[in-house]
Image (cartoon, coloured by chain):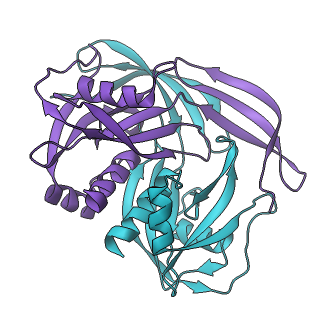
Chain colours: A cyan, B purple
Amino acid sequence: MDLKETRISSQPIFEGSFINIARDTVRLPNGNESTRVVIRHPGAACVLAVTGSDEVVLVRQWRYACGRALLELPAGKLDAGEDPAVCALRELAEETPYTAESVKLLHTFYTAPGFCDEVMYLYQAENVREGSTLKNDEDEFTETVLMSRDAVKAALKNNEVADAKTLAGLQYWLLNG
Amino acid sequence: MDLKETRISSQPIFEGSFINIARDTVRLPNGNESTRVVIRHPGAACVLAVTGSDEVVLVRQWRYACGRALLELPAGKLDAGEDPAVCALRELAEETPYTAESVKLLHTFYTAPGFCDEVMYLYQAENVREGSTLKNDEDEFTETVLMSRDAVKAALKNNEVADAKTLAGLQYWLLNG
Protein backbone atom coordinates (compact mmCIF):
# COMPACT_ATOMS: atom_id res chain seq x y z
CA MET A 1 0.00 0.00 0.00
CA ASP A 2 1.27 3.50 -0.79
CA LEU A 3 1.31 5.33 2.53
CA LYS A 4 3.35 8.40 1.64
CA GLU A 5 2.15 11.94 2.25
CA THR A 6 3.75 14.63 0.10
CA ARG A 7 4.24 18.29 1.03
CA ILE A 8 2.34 20.79 -1.12
CA SER A 9 3.19 23.92 0.87
CA SER A 10 4.46 25.00 4.29
CA GLN A 11 3.45 27.95 6.46
CA PRO A 12 5.82 28.91 9.31
CA ILE A 13 4.06 29.39 12.66
CA PHE A 14 6.88 29.86 15.15
CA GLU A 15 10.67 29.94 15.24
CA GLY A 16 12.12 29.48 18.70
CA SER A 17 15.56 28.91 20.15
CA PHE A 18 15.34 25.18 19.53
CA ILE A 19 11.83 24.47 18.20
CA ASN A 20 10.36 25.51 14.86
CA ILE A 21 6.70 24.99 14.10
CA ALA A 22 5.01 24.94 10.69
CA ARG A 23 1.62 24.07 9.29
CA ASP A 24 2.03 22.12 6.06
CA THR A 25 -0.54 21.28 3.41
CA VAL A 26 -0.02 17.71 2.21
CA ARG A 27 -1.24 15.35 -0.51
CA LEU A 28 -2.60 12.09 0.93
CA PRO A 29 -2.20 8.69 -0.78
CA ASN A 30 -5.82 8.91 -1.99
CA GLY A 31 -5.19 12.31 -3.64
CA ASN A 32 -7.00 14.34 -1.00
CA GLU A 33 -5.39 17.34 0.68
CA SER A 34 -4.92 17.65 4.41
CA THR A 35 -2.92 19.78 6.85
CA ARG A 36 -0.19 18.69 9.28
CA VAL A 37 1.20 20.75 12.14
CA VAL A 38 4.87 19.80 12.40
CA ILE A 39 7.23 20.61 15.26
CA ARG A 40 10.88 20.55 14.24
CA HIS A 41 13.33 19.67 17.01
CA PRO A 42 17.15 19.25 16.88
CA GLY A 43 17.02 15.78 18.47
CA ALA A 44 18.27 14.62 21.84
CA ALA A 45 20.31 11.96 23.57
CA CYS A 46 19.80 10.08 26.84
CA VAL A 47 21.95 7.62 28.70
CA LEU A 48 21.48 4.48 30.76
CA ALA A 49 24.38 4.65 33.23
CA VAL A 50 24.78 1.81 35.72
CA THR A 51 27.26 2.12 38.60
CA GLY A 52 29.68 -0.52 39.83
CA SER A 53 27.12 -1.25 42.58
CA ASP A 54 24.55 -2.13 39.88
CA GLU A 55 22.46 0.98 40.42
CA VAL A 56 21.09 3.13 37.60
CA VAL A 57 21.79 6.87 37.66
CA LEU A 58 18.61 8.95 37.28
CA VAL A 59 17.84 12.64 37.63
CA ARG A 60 14.79 14.29 39.12
CA GLN A 61 13.94 17.62 37.52
CA TRP A 62 11.02 19.97 37.12
CA ARG A 63 9.17 19.64 33.82
CA TYR A 64 7.28 22.87 33.37
CA ALA A 65 5.12 21.55 30.51
CA CYS A 66 3.91 18.75 32.81
CA GLY A 67 3.59 20.88 35.96
CA ARG A 68 5.57 18.36 38.02
CA ALA A 69 8.99 16.86 38.69
CA LEU A 70 9.88 13.68 36.80
CA LEU A 71 12.45 10.96 37.34
CA GLU A 72 14.41 10.55 34.10
CA LEU A 73 17.52 9.22 32.47
CA PRO A 74 20.13 11.98 32.11
CA ALA A 75 19.33 13.59 28.76
CA GLY A 76 19.49 16.72 26.73
CA LYS A 77 19.08 18.34 23.35
CA LEU A 78 21.81 18.03 20.76
CA ASP A 79 23.88 21.17 20.28
CA ALA A 80 24.17 22.25 16.63
CA GLY A 81 26.13 19.59 14.76
CA GLU A 82 26.82 17.61 17.95
CA ASP A 83 27.40 13.85 17.79
CA PRO A 84 24.60 12.28 19.89
CA ALA A 85 27.15 10.07 21.66
CA VAL A 86 29.11 13.16 22.73
CA CYS A 87 25.83 14.74 23.89
CA ALA A 88 25.00 11.67 26.01
CA LEU A 89 28.41 11.72 27.71
CA ARG A 90 28.15 15.49 28.24
CA GLU A 91 24.68 15.33 29.79
CA LEU A 92 25.69 12.55 32.18
CA ALA A 93 28.64 14.63 33.35
CA GLU A 94 26.63 17.86 33.57
CA GLU A 95 23.53 16.54 35.31
CA THR A 96 24.99 13.92 37.67
CA PRO A 97 28.19 13.32 39.67
CA TYR A 98 29.00 10.46 37.30
CA THR A 99 31.00 10.26 34.09
CA ALA A 100 31.56 7.49 31.57
CA GLU A 101 34.39 6.60 29.24
CA SER A 102 32.22 5.79 26.23
CA VAL A 103 28.66 4.97 25.20
CA LYS A 104 27.02 2.27 23.09
CA LEU A 105 23.86 3.00 21.06
CA LEU A 106 20.89 0.90 22.21
CA HIS A 107 17.86 2.38 20.43
CA THR A 108 16.94 5.35 18.27
CA PHE A 109 13.31 6.46 18.33
CA TYR A 110 10.87 9.29 17.71
CA THR A 111 9.28 10.58 20.91
CA ALA A 112 6.04 11.92 19.40
CA PRO A 113 5.97 11.00 15.68
CA GLY A 114 2.37 12.16 15.21
CA PHE A 115 3.42 15.80 15.24
CA CYS A 116 7.14 16.14 16.05
CA ASP A 117 10.39 15.03 14.39
CA GLU A 118 12.39 14.78 17.63
CA VAL A 119 14.72 11.78 17.47
CA MET A 120 15.96 10.38 20.78
CA TYR A 121 19.22 8.44 20.89
CA LEU A 122 19.32 6.04 23.84
CA TYR A 123 22.83 4.98 24.89
CA GLN A 124 24.33 2.71 27.48
CA ALA A 125 27.27 4.25 29.33
CA GLU A 126 30.45 2.17 29.57
CA ASN A 127 32.95 2.37 32.46
CA VAL A 128 30.81 4.63 34.65
CA ARG A 129 32.79 6.48 37.32
CA GLU A 130 31.83 8.68 40.25
CA GLY A 131 33.74 11.70 41.36
CA SER A 132 33.03 14.76 39.28
CA THR A 133 31.07 17.71 40.58
CA LEU A 134 27.88 18.74 38.78
CA LYS A 135 28.33 21.10 35.87
CA ASN A 136 24.72 22.20 35.50
CA ASP A 137 24.13 25.61 34.03
CA GLU A 138 23.26 28.25 36.62
CA ASP A 139 19.57 27.99 35.69
CA GLU A 140 19.40 24.17 35.56
CA PHE A 141 18.33 22.19 38.65
CA THR A 142 18.55 18.42 38.96
CA GLU A 143 18.73 15.92 41.80
CA THR A 144 20.59 12.64 41.31
CA VAL A 145 18.72 9.45 42.25
CA LEU A 146 20.31 5.97 42.29
CA MET A 147 18.05 2.93 41.96
CA SER A 148 18.77 -0.76 42.28
CA ARG A 149 17.33 -3.29 39.89
CA ASP A 150 14.70 -4.30 42.48
CA ALA A 151 13.75 -0.67 43.07
CA VAL A 152 13.33 -0.19 39.30
CA LYS A 153 11.11 -3.27 39.08
CA ALA A 154 8.93 -1.90 41.88
CA ALA A 155 8.80 1.57 40.33
CA LEU A 156 7.73 0.14 36.95
CA LYS A 157 5.10 -2.03 38.59
CA ASN A 158 3.73 0.98 40.47
CA ASN A 159 3.63 3.11 37.28
CA GLU A 160 6.07 5.59 38.84
CA VAL A 161 8.24 6.05 35.74
CA ALA A 162 6.35 8.73 33.83
CA ASP A 163 8.78 9.49 31.00
CA ALA A 164 8.89 7.50 27.75
CA LYS A 165 12.66 7.43 27.18
CA THR A 166 13.27 6.48 30.81
CA LEU A 167 10.72 3.68 30.65
CA ALA A 168 12.43 2.34 27.51
CA GLY A 169 15.89 2.61 29.03
CA LEU A 170 14.96 0.94 32.32
CA GLN A 171 13.11 -1.87 30.57
CA TYR A 172 16.19 -2.38 28.37
CA TRP A 173 18.28 -2.72 31.53
CA LEU A 174 15.94 -5.33 33.01
CA LEU A 175 15.80 -7.25 29.71
CA ASN A 176 19.51 -7.15 28.93
CA GLY A 177 21.41 -6.26 32.10
CA MET B 1 15.83 20.80 46.79
CA ASP B 2 13.09 23.10 45.52
CA LEU B 3 12.77 22.32 41.81
CA LYS B 4 9.49 24.06 40.99
CA GLU B 5 9.15 26.59 38.17
CA THR B 6 6.23 29.00 38.51
CA ARG B 7 4.37 30.71 35.68
CA ILE B 8 4.65 34.50 35.56
CA SER B 9 2.85 35.06 32.25
CA SER B 10 1.79 33.20 29.12
CA GLN B 11 1.77 34.33 25.49
CA PRO B 12 -0.31 32.25 23.03
CA ILE B 13 1.56 31.32 19.84
CA PHE B 14 -0.77 28.94 18.03
CA GLU B 15 -4.17 27.32 18.51
CA GLY B 16 -4.74 24.30 16.29
CA SER B 17 -7.33 21.57 16.02
CA PHE B 18 -5.61 19.52 18.71
CA ILE B 19 -2.39 21.34 19.63
CA ASN B 20 -2.03 24.68 21.41
CA ILE B 21 1.31 26.35 21.75
CA ALA B 22 2.32 29.08 24.19
CA ARG B 23 5.49 30.78 25.32
CA ASP B 24 5.48 31.22 29.08
CA THR B 25 7.70 33.35 31.27
CA VAL B 26 8.59 31.43 34.43
CA ARG B 27 10.27 31.99 37.79
CA LEU B 28 13.10 29.50 38.42
CA PRO B 29 13.94 28.06 41.86
CA ASN B 30 16.87 30.51 42.14
CA GLY B 31 14.59 33.50 41.49
CA ASN B 32 15.75 34.09 37.91
CA GLU B 33 13.28 34.42 35.04
CA SER B 34 13.31 32.18 31.98
CA THR B 35 10.99 31.30 29.10
CA ARG B 36 9.41 27.94 28.26
CA VAL B 37 7.73 27.01 24.99
CA VAL B 38 4.90 24.65 25.91
CA ILE B 39 2.91 22.47 23.55
CA ARG B 40 -0.48 21.49 24.95
CA HIS B 41 -1.85 18.17 23.66
CA PRO B 42 -5.09 16.33 24.62
CA GLY B 43 -3.24 13.09 25.44
CA ALA B 44 -3.35 9.75 23.68
CA ALA B 45 -3.76 6.03 24.23
CA CYS B 46 -2.00 3.02 22.72
CA VAL B 47 -2.57 -0.68 23.06
CA LEU B 48 -0.48 -3.84 23.27
CA ALA B 49 -2.76 -6.43 21.66
CA VAL B 50 -1.51 -10.02 21.48
CA THR B 51 -3.42 -12.58 19.41
CA GLY B 52 -4.24 -16.16 20.40
CA SER B 53 -1.22 -17.20 18.28
CA ASP B 54 1.02 -15.07 20.54
CA GLU B 55 1.63 -12.39 17.92
CA VAL B 56 1.50 -8.67 18.63
CA VAL B 57 -0.73 -6.48 16.45
CA LEU B 58 1.14 -3.49 15.00
CA VAL B 59 0.31 -0.88 12.39
CA ARG B 60 2.55 0.64 9.78
CA GLN B 61 1.63 4.22 8.90
CA TRP B 62 3.15 7.32 7.37
CA ARG B 63 4.45 9.86 9.85
CA TYR B 64 4.66 13.12 7.99
CA ALA B 65 6.72 14.87 10.69
CA CYS B 66 9.35 12.13 10.37
CA GLY B 67 9.18 11.80 6.58
CA ARG B 68 8.83 8.02 6.78
CA ALA B 69 6.53 5.16 7.68
CA LEU B 70 6.81 3.74 11.21
CA LEU B 71 5.79 0.48 12.81
CA GLU B 72 3.71 1.30 15.90
CA LEU B 73 1.26 0.05 18.45
CA PRO B 74 -2.29 1.01 17.48
CA ALA B 75 -2.78 4.44 19.02
CA GLY B 76 -4.59 7.72 18.76
CA LYS B 77 -5.43 11.02 20.37
CA LEU B 78 -8.13 11.20 23.01
CA ASP B 79 -11.39 12.71 21.84
CA ALA B 80 -12.66 15.51 24.09
CA GLY B 81 -13.59 14.00 27.46
CA GLU B 82 -12.84 10.44 26.25
CA ASP B 83 -11.76 7.75 28.72
CA PRO B 84 -8.27 6.64 27.60
CA ALA B 85 -9.34 2.97 27.92
CA VAL B 86 -12.23 3.58 25.52
CA CYS B 87 -9.83 5.36 23.17
CA ALA B 88 -7.44 2.38 23.21
CA LEU B 89 -10.24 -0.08 22.36
CA ARG B 90 -11.54 2.26 19.66
CA GLU B 91 -8.15 2.72 17.99
CA LEU B 92 -7.48 -1.03 17.94
CA ALA B 93 -10.83 -1.60 16.22
CA GLU B 94 -10.40 1.32 13.80
CA GLU B 95 -6.80 0.71 12.75
CA THR B 96 -6.61 -3.10 12.68
CA PRO B 97 -8.89 -6.08 11.98
CA TYR B 98 -8.76 -6.93 15.71
CA THR B 99 -10.94 -6.00 18.63
CA ALA B 100 -10.64 -6.58 22.35
CA GLU B 101 -13.12 -7.00 25.17
CA SER B 102 -11.30 -4.82 27.67
CA VAL B 103 -7.95 -3.23 28.44
CA LYS B 104 -5.65 -3.08 31.46
CA LEU B 105 -3.46 -0.02 32.13
CA LEU B 106 0.26 -0.86 32.03
CA HIS B 107 2.03 2.50 32.08
CA THR B 108 1.27 6.19 31.84
CA PHE B 109 4.04 8.46 30.58
CA TYR B 110 4.89 11.79 28.99
CA THR B 111 6.25 11.42 25.46
CA ALA B 112 8.33 14.62 25.35
CA PRO B 113 8.21 16.26 28.79
CA GLY B 114 10.83 18.85 27.93
CA PHE B 115 8.36 20.87 25.88
CA CYS B 116 5.02 19.02 25.60
CA ASP B 117 2.36 17.88 28.07
CA GLU B 118 1.18 14.90 25.97
CA VAL B 119 0.35 11.97 28.27
CA MET B 120 0.38 8.51 26.70
CA TYR B 121 -1.70 5.74 28.29
CA LEU B 122 -0.28 2.30 27.42
CA TYR B 123 -2.80 -0.53 27.77
CA GLN B 124 -2.77 -4.28 27.34
CA ALA B 125 -5.76 -5.61 25.41
CA GLU B 126 -7.68 -8.52 26.95
CA ASN B 127 -9.56 -11.17 24.94
CA VAL B 128 -8.27 -10.07 21.53
CA ARG B 129 -10.42 -11.28 18.63
CA GLU B 130 -10.06 -11.13 14.88
CA GLY B 131 -12.87 -10.55 12.47
CA SER B 132 -13.87 -6.97 12.16
CA THR B 133 -13.17 -4.92 9.06
CA LEU B 134 -11.06 -1.78 9.37
CA LYS B 135 -12.92 1.38 10.30
CA ASN B 136 -10.24 3.90 9.39
CA ASP B 137 -11.39 7.33 8.38
CA GLU B 138 -11.35 7.93 4.64
CA ASP B 139 -8.11 9.91 4.98
CA GLU B 140 -6.34 7.48 7.35
CA PHE B 141 -4.06 4.76 5.95
CA THR B 142 -2.61 1.93 8.00
CA GLU B 143 -1.25 -1.54 7.30
CA THR B 144 -1.56 -4.26 9.93
CA VAL B 145 1.61 -6.17 10.83
CA LEU B 146 1.69 -9.23 13.13
CA MET B 147 4.96 -10.10 14.87
CA SER B 148 5.96 -13.11 16.94
CA ARG B 149 7.95 -12.75 20.13
CA ASP B 150 11.12 -13.86 18.31
CA ALA B 151 10.51 -11.36 15.52
CA VAL B 152 10.09 -8.60 18.12
CA LYS B 153 13.34 -9.60 19.83
CA ALA B 154 15.14 -9.42 16.49
CA ALA B 155 13.52 -6.08 15.60
CA LEU B 156 14.55 -4.57 18.95
CA LYS B 157 18.09 -5.88 18.60
CA ASN B 158 18.33 -4.42 15.09
CA ASN B 159 17.00 -1.02 16.27
CA GLU B 160 14.01 -1.32 13.93
CA VAL B 161 11.39 -0.07 16.39
CA ALA B 162 11.63 3.69 15.96
CA ASP B 163 8.70 4.86 18.09
CA ALA B 164 8.96 5.42 21.84
CA LYS B 165 5.55 4.10 22.95
CA THR B 166 5.97 1.02 20.74
CA LEU B 167 9.43 0.30 22.12
CA ALA B 168 8.05 0.58 25.66
CA GLY B 169 5.06 -1.65 24.89
CA LEU B 170 7.10 -4.35 23.17
CA GLN B 171 9.68 -4.38 25.97
CA TYR B 172 6.82 -4.77 28.43
CA TRP B 173 5.58 -7.77 26.48
CA LEU B 174 9.00 -9.43 26.52
CA LEU B 175 9.45 -8.71 30.23
CA ASN B 176 5.99 -9.72 31.38
CA GLY B 177 4.37 -11.79 28.65
Location of residue B62 in the rendering, given as x and y in whole percent from the top left corner: 30, 33
Q: Is residue B22 above or below residue A134?
A: above
Residue at the spot 48% in from the left edge and 64% down from the top edge: A154
Location of residue B158 in the rendering, given as x and y in whole percent from the top left corner: 24, 62
Location of residue A22 in the rendering, given as x and y in whole percent from the top left corner: 54, 27
Q: Is residue A9 left or right of residue A65?
A: left
Residue at the spot 11% in from the left edge and 43% down from the top edge: B52
Q: Is residue A167 left or right of residue B143?
A: right
Location of residue A169 by image quarter: bottom left
Q: Is residue B108 above or below residue A7?
A: below
* Any part of residue A83 in sight: no
Location of residue A31 in the rendering, given as x and y in whole percent from the top left corner: 26, 13
Location of residue A8 by image quarter: top left
Report the quarter where the N terminus of chain B lies: bottom right
* Any part of residue B5 in sight: yes
Report the quarter where the C terminus of chain B lies: bottom left
Location of residue B15 by image quarter: top right
Residue at the spot 43% in from the left edge and 27% down from the top edge: B77
Q: Is residue B147 above or below residue A15?
A: below
Pick the front one: B7 or A90: B7
Pick the front one: B93 or A112: B93
Q: How many marks?
A: 0
Q: Is residue A24 above or below residue A42?
A: above
Residue at the spot 25% in from the left edge and 30% down from the top edge: B101
Furthest toward the right, the residue is B31
